[in-house]
Amino acid sequence: MTDDTTDKSCTEGTARSDKNCTETEGTAKSDENCIEMQGHAKVNLGLDVVGRLPNGYHEVKMVMQTVGVHDTVTLRKIPEGIKFSTENGEIPCDDTNLAYRAAKLFLESAGVKGGVEIRLIKRIPVAAGLAGGSTDAAAVFKGMNILYRTGLTEEALKEFGVKIGADVPYCIMGGTALAEGIGEKLTPLPDVPEAAVLLAKPDLFVSTKEVYGKLHLSEKTKHPDIDGMVEAIREGSLSGVTDRMGNVLQDVTAPSYPVIGRLIELMEESGAVRAMMSGSGPTVFGIFKDKEEAARCKEVLEQKQAEVQWTEKGYQPVKQIFVTEFVSA
């Protein structure tokens, strides 16, 4: 059990990787008392809502894909409790934070004697439809499993994860996957063919709960061809994937925020094979043949939003833009 004297304070400027963490294989650095993990963002290549479950949750069918933009989560053993720090003032440092809740659940459920200090370097935009909070929680679960040598399987960690959030099990697994149910029923898929990805996060907040609350499925709802996308992935066809990209939540979010539609237009005019909103928004991502094309599009977006007409037409500023790529599990 965790101690009730857990530290819930945010300490600015302290979220740096520990120099005593030594590098190991993959995306982690560790020693006996400290481990540094990467938590990667995700995009939804396809997002469909197929109905509503008896418990009130929406039943989804999605193709999820990890991308290169990542947070760094450093975990250090301490005698008891949980200490959390980050340099990002938008991040809560108490049990409303998914990473904090993951640590608390792990300590309570895995038979661990001790505590953990969590230091977060945040790069993934907050409230962006990129699973930034979920991937930090996943990094905590995986890192504490290594740090405390509990030997839990990935499936066991996923069972912990779904108690924190629907996207956490996927973030534990990563890569390319079909997600069903509330997002916790996962089928691993082959890697999507290599491509560059441009992420653009407007300076606005979108509530996932409100977006789903405004979603009304009908015969007129345009459902993406998720089964066809899965088949295209298995065949190694990037064009087959991009031809079938779709997100039923985009029709809910985009009308309220014209900047989303404008970013999609600009990306596709600037060389994107396809552009779309990720998750419940507001981040827009475009798929490009290479990083050079994606970088040129980034320059276009930066130039366009510097023009007076951008705000005159009601477009919110683009807060963060990343050129990245698909990442394997």
Image: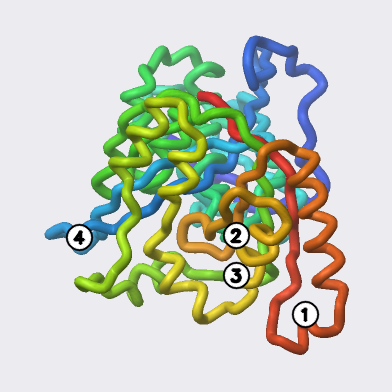
Mark sitting on residue 165 = none
Mark 3 residue type: Ile
Under mark 2, the amino acid is: Thr
Query: Along the line of sight, which residue is nearer the eye, 218 or 188?
Result: 218
Q: Quadrant of the N terminus?
A: top left
* Mark 1 to mark 2 CA distance (whole Å): 17 Å
Q: Residue at x 72, y 13 (%)?
A: 23
Locate residue 136, reporting x and y percent. 56, 40
Q: Earlier in the sequence, mark 3 or mark 2?
A: 3
Front of the two marks 4 and 3: 3
User: Residue 227 at x, y = what percent?
Assistant: 28, 41
- Identify the mark at residue 260; answer none if there is no mark: 3
Q: Amino acid at mark 1?
A: Trp
Instruction: State the image quarter where residue 27 is shown.
Output: top right
Q: Which residue is mark 2?
A: 283
Q: Are marks 4 and 2 in contact (CB under 8 Å)?
A: no
Local packing at callout 4 (Cα closer than 10 Å; few below 14, some 14-19, many 20+) is some
Which residue was labeled with disc 4? 51
* Vertical side of 227 occupied by 32: above or below: above
Q: Earlier in the sequence, mark 4 or mark 3?
A: 4
Residue situated in front as seen by the camera: 260 or 300: 300
